[in-house]
Amino acid sequence: MHQADGRILMKEPRRALVTDRERAGHTQESLATALGVDVKTVRNWENGTYKPRTPDLHRRLAEELRITRRQLTLRFDHTAHNEIDPPDQLAEHQARPPRLASVLEEALDSEEADRLSYSLHWPESVDHSTLDILQRCLTYIRHAEDDTSSSAVIPVVGEVQRIANSFANASRASIRRHATGLLSEVEQYRGWLAIPSRDWHTAQRHLDRATVVALESDDPLRLSTALSFSAYSALRRFDLSSADALSEAALRDKRVHAGLRAYELFQRAEILARSALRKASVALLLSADGLVEHLPDDTDLPSSGYWYTPPFFLGQKAFVLRALGDYSGARQAAVDCLAEMPPDWSESEWAARRRELAGAG
């Protein structure tokens, strides 16, 4: 115990945190190993002495405990004393749109941040390692979107887009394919972020450029992704003719990850169902289900496709079933999807259509 403002205060054990850990199947030792900290640190969290020192550690702890970051913040609200930062400051940090400076600080170590910062002033110095560092920044922002919204990350993605563009323009022949491939990924992500607000013009402008740049870099994964995102945009606009052509084009190149292939099969199955081509839609739905059963482990997923997981694809299946007229099956698939996805995903902006479908009568 300790004294503050003349009062005797006891450290209050965070019993809910212990319960979360046990429900997640972790011992103190296994949780410490998963997070790369010592067991004493985990004990200090649970006995009310400290909380995670950084937002990144806070995020990873929430993932291991299978709760949302908001729920984890509440676990620490009862012991505001002897902490590194008050919980409300951490909550404010999570709600605040990320800035490039904070992304560099939280996604990279100091040497990587220095290297990237130097390349911002001297794009001609960019090499493969520098591009990989910028890729990690983009991955960090994608996860930040899960916790905030598409509009919250658009400004920082715009900054990353300008950096990627300057790197591609200044790149030497030996790294040009790598640089243009990354630029394509940034452009397609920026186009994707415009869809929730129904800013169709901006979405298509960035997705069109993503497609062109992916063709230049001969990058099948990024080209196929850009085309499938364009098909999704067309589907949301009820432009079935364009959606059909774009989804067919997205499926042409077979040199893509199985997770992306599954996404595109579900997408095309929905398009065909909406076009009253029921038999073809059902056949593709079965093929997509088969692919999902054999998806690689999470560790083998591309950074741009960390969401290629069976729970996510249950949501895609729900949309196909709804288009086929199986409303009961669609609702159940959406319910199962939300139940099996990580809490941060199920409560995210992009899962809103899944939540709406799960709640349909």
Image (spheres, helix red, strand yellow):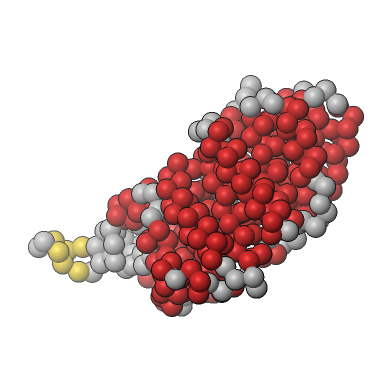
Q: Residue at x 67, y 32 (%)?
A: 234
Q: Is residue 2 above or below residue 16?
A: below
Number of numbered discs: 0
The residue depicted at 54 percent of the width and 46 percent of the height is 190
Q: Is residue 347 visible?
A: no
Q: Residue at x 62, y 60 (%)?
A: 180
In the image, residue 46 above or below residue 332: below
Residue at 64% over, 35% down: 233
Left or right of 126: which side holds 100? Answer: left
Quadrant of the frame with the C terminus? top right
For the question of whether residue 275 can be seen, the reply is yes
Q: Is residue 185 above or below residue 346?
A: below
Q: Quadrant of the N terminus?
A: bottom left
Looking at the picture, how far across and down is residue 306, in whole percent? Answer: 63, 56
Quadrant in the rendering for residue 24: bottom right
Q: Is residue 32 above or below residue 231?
A: below
- Depth check: give the residue in front, 125 or 190: 125
Whether residue 38 sits left or right of residue 334 in the image: it is left
Instruction: From the top left corner, tell me how far across and down residue 141 is, in percent.
Output: 49, 55
